[in-house]
Image (cartoon, rainbow, N blue to C red):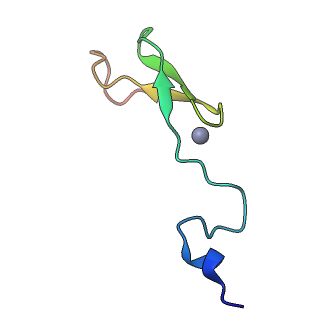
């Protein structure tokens, strides 16, 4: 039959793709912790508003 399934936006074969919906906690210093509302992946976000060294890792 026709491969209709492969034409959609979800035609990815490997790991399921999550369009992360980050829920970011209030800033605590330079970084904020965010968790995806969908897959619960955790990620650290850098706060651009932090005033301090620019090139520091
Ligand atoms: Zn996600």
Residue lying at the far top in this picture: please name it: 28
The N terminus, quarter of image: bottom right
Above/below status of 55 relative to 8: above
> Can you say whether 34 is above or below 3 in the image?
above
| Residue 35 occupies quadrant | top right
Vertical side of 3 occupied by 37: above or below: above
Q: Work out which residue is located at the far front of the displayed protein and give it.
A: 1
Q: Position of residue 50 (x, y in %)?
A: 31, 17
Residue 9 appears anywhere in the view: yes
Image quarter for ligand 1 equals top right
Q: Residue at x 49, y 36 (%)?
A: 21
Q: Taking 45 as reference, is 41 left or right?
A: right
Q: Which residue appears at 64% of the width and 33% of the height?
A: 41
Res. 42 image quadrant: top right
Q: Residue at x 72, y 64 (%)?
A: 14
Q: Nearer the viewer, residue 10 or 13?
A: 10
């Amino acid at each position: 039959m026709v491969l209709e399934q492969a034409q959609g936006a979800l035609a990815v074969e490997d790991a399921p793709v999550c369009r992360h919906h980050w829920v970011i906690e209030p800033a605590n210093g330079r970084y904020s912790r965010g968790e995806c509302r969908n897959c619960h992946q955790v990620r650290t976000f850098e706060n651009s508003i932090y005033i301090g060294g620019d090139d520091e890792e």
